[in-house]
Image: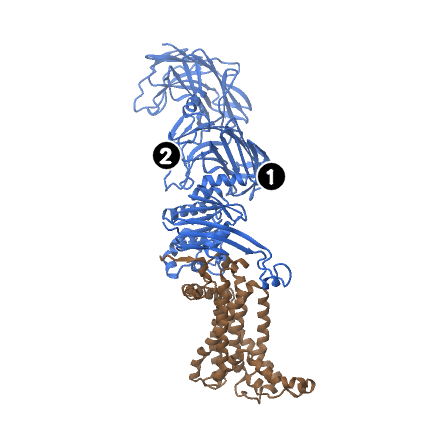
Chain colours: A brown, B blue
Amino acid sequence: MQTRIYHSDEQRQIWRVVPDLIRARELLRDLITKDFRVKYRYAAMGVAWAVIEPLALTFVLSFVFVFVFPSRVSGTPGAEAPFPVSLLCALIFWQFSASALSAATVSLVTYQDLVKKNCFAREIIPLSMACYPLINLGLGFVILIAMHLSFGGGIGWSLALFPLVFIIQFVMTAGLALLFSCSHVLFRDVGYMVNVALLFGFYATPIFYRLEWVMAKSSLPEAVQQNHPWLEPLYPWLQRLYLLNPMAELMTAYRQMLFESRFPDLWLLGWPAVMAALALALGVTVFRRNAALLSDHL
Amino acid sequence: MTPIIEVNDVCKIYPSRRGIRTLVGRGGLGDWLRRRNTTTFNALNHVTLNVQPGESIGIIGRNGSGKSTLLKILAGVTLPTTGNVIVRGRVASLLELGAGFAPVLTGRENIYLNAGLLGMRHRQVDAVIEDIIEFSGIRDFVDQPVDTYSSGMFVRLAFSVAIHTSPDIFLADEVLAVGDEEFQRKCRRKIGELREQGKTILFVSHDLGVINALCERVVLLNKGKVLLRETPQKTIMYYLRQVGREAGVHTYRDGDVEAIFCDGRISLYRQGEEFTSPIGVHANVQSLGSWHASPTSADWTALHRRENGCTAEGQMARMPAKWVWEQSIVDGAWQMTVSLVCERELSIQRIEVCLALSSEYAHWIYGDHDAPFPAIMPQDLQWDVLAAPEKSVQHVAALPTPASPLPPVDISVDLHDTRLFTLWANSDYNQYSRLFVVAGNFPENGGLFPPGAHRLFSWRLDTAQSAETIRTQMKAERTLRCGRMELFFEHGYINVAADGIALTAPPHFYTSMLIEGLWHNSHSLQWTGAIEADGSLRMTGESRRFPLRQHWRITPKHNAASVLIHLEVTEPLRVEEYHASIGLTAAYTNWSTDHESGVFAEITPQADIWKHMNRSFIPGRHIAATGPNLPRIALDTTPTQDSLPYRMTAINTSHRENARVLQALCASDAGEIRFVPGQYVYFSGVLRMDDA
């Protein structure tokens, strides 16, 4: 058995996160499988729920936008992709980030017994929460491909690009998970803020619509123009503001890869990559600085 | 040697309002943004502590003294505010058992998960998982979800995981007070093993007995400062004096004897030396199958606090009863009366009140027995009862080794509840003590205690006498001098000697009754101590099987003793025959009665039953025996009005017993004697010794 000397102050040094996480990799895996088991063990249909949930959402949204608001859906750019497939393509990736963040944010408080009584790399708690929806994502992706094929789509080499793009999303999610979970311990308001932000994000991200619909419009709808003429000059600014949401670019990149079988536009990846790096740096730094004292605030 | 743990000038300041933050107000968001700490809690205040490898350290202190904080910092759960901590080695911290158990996972999955939290890899767990399952004793349930476990199983599994993570340093916070008595012993033994393997152990506990038994050094914390770091005895004594004003603690003294009562456990000191072992005086009750130990399952209050004593009341937590221990030290002797107050009718299977003495005591004296304590070996997992429990000797003693500074202890017990008995035992290896126990075993339905107070017994410990004095005194107390004849009283029989030479042989002078086809000897009655009154000695023996008591009254005369035995019957009783007899050594050769006389036949090796020597069974009054160079022994009966006629018979015993017996037998022609409740003369006569 190796002997480890530790200075208690070292726990706050940021570079130590790397060896700590390497040492705790098995524990991380255990926690992820634990969450998965815990979630579905006592459900009669078990893991089937991981498939049913996104399908149900796809069904209800498809119903609304294909039958209730059909005018906006057909005859616009990108309409060549069948709506349900296009919706599911964005939905599973959005759901990944949304469920990862909402679970990870409160994770340290949920698992305060562990934090208060055991010494381990604290990062693995929010990280396991961020990793756990990967399982749902994987199942969802299989359904997506099946649905895509059944609607007559073709599969190209661009499928191999999905992981590459997804890494950007994952890094960003993990960074934010660290940041939010740690700040939630200090300010319990963060949990609510994240939930509000995710609700907001669901509509501010091209999930049941397409980025092209937002960007292509050079002007507002007529009814809005008449009632609020002052909005007209602001609209380009609103579009730029909209593009600040890195998820908007990522969702569009996924769709380009699936439906157009091509490498996504580079501008769709650049901004999210910058955001992901920022989120990770900020998340890791803030978390490490506070992790060792988290138990004092629980 | 490099210390394995270095705590250098550590302070820990907690934010006062943990988990709560408001936008405004003290400690709120506004204050935090302005970096203004308004209210904080200072848990540790410049603590410096070094621990050497292999040391076992206990940490004690009142609530809020910083014990747990110190342990948390060592475990790495939180950081010190200033100062630093260096830990050289792997730490297993047991700050709470089972933190991190997922209820829906099976026991086996939880073992991996929990061991992972304690820093183990899967590969390492694979190597010890069988040991873990074995130690926890839940093999049959290990593949079931943990939420089907009882809380005891849960805790056992958790402890078992923690103890098998092969740490260099083991930190435990109040986790040993879990599980049943048996599992606690197992835990203590395991920790003892770890200690022998040279692991470093740090404990926080309120159970001073555990601390005392398992730690080499004890650190006393008070308000975040290290107050003392000394041997367990010194630190604990200092601590108890310091917290002496707390409800369940009282220190009292008289002369050079001092006693500390602390939550159901009493430690006794003479001239500053503790002569009780760490587990001290304590009590256990078994009711409806579960044990209730006085230090752990009762809530104690010390009332009537005096310089030299107090009355302690312990309300039992899981049983509608309370202990009342009236303690005092009078004339340098510690004494205590133990009562049990039942709130409603209670069924009790066993009561044990133990006086655990230090292992430095080498000899025990129990009535006519005087023997050394055997050594306590590591494989001893249970008590080793040394003195026969069917006899209830009420004056006993324990003598220390000659080199020991501990005093000889002379114990007199007064059993108010005659169902109780006393015994000497060696404890198991973990407790490592000599035990004097007042116990009661109540069979099914026999231990129904009605509501109200039950005085069980009182005892008195005298530590002022020398070993020699105690020995002579104990002998003299049981000796009655009648001229040249000496009678030694044992429980249910009397030894006779003349000029220091034993005349009787087992069974000595005794009585026996034939009831329901079985001889019922006076040895098997439960005897109270001899009481001296009006120049005679009185003893009472009570049968535990039949509704009868015998009252013996012995009055010394010149070279003779008159013996008057009354039989008290409380329920109608049928007795086939009964007698009073004296067993003499085989050196007696001749016998004589009113009607005939003869020679005792040689007792041959073939003799396996008792054999009558006389031929005539006509009732008589006298019988005597003589032998070469031996005084003549005579048993002269003095019939009273209501006593049955005696048949005086001389008997040879079996070869194994090898004794001559002179017997005064009462038998009815009807084949049985019926007794209605009342008092009867059982035997009345004189035991006389004449020169040959």
Q: Residue furthest left?
A: B605
Q: Quadrant of residue B302?
A: top right
Residue A208 located left or right of residue B431: right
Q: Chain of mark 2?
A: B
Q: Mark 2 is on which residue type?
A: Pro
| CB contact under 8 Å: marks 1 and 2 | no
Q: Mark 1 is on which residue type?
A: Glu
Residue A138 located left or right of residue B596: right
The answer to whether one can see residue B196 in this image is: yes
| Residue placed most toward the observer, A200 or B316 | A200
Residue B315, relative to residue B391: is it above or below? below
| Residue placed most toward the observer, A98 or B416 | A98
Q: In the image, residue B311 lies at what x, y percent?
A: 57, 34
* Tally of numbered tags: 2
Q: Quadrant of the C terminus of chain B?
A: top left
Q: Within 10 Å of the Cα at label 2, are there few (<14), some (14-19), or many (20+) other Cα atoms? A: few
Label for residue B343?
Answer: 1
Q: Residue furthest right?
A: A227
Q: Earlier in the sequence, mark 1 or mark 2?
A: 1
Residue B505, relative to residue B37: is it above or below? above
The alpha-carbon separation of the residues under discs 1 and 2 comes to 42 Å
Tell me the SS state at disc 1.
Answer: loop
Q: Residue furthest bottom?
A: A75
Tell me the SS state at disc 2.
Answer: loop
Looking at the image, which residue is at 39% across and 27% down? B370
| Residue placed most toward the observer, B218 or B626 | B218
Residue that badge 2 annotates? B374
Q: Within 10 Å of the Cα at label 1, are there few (<14), some (14-19), or many (20+) other Cα atoms? A: some
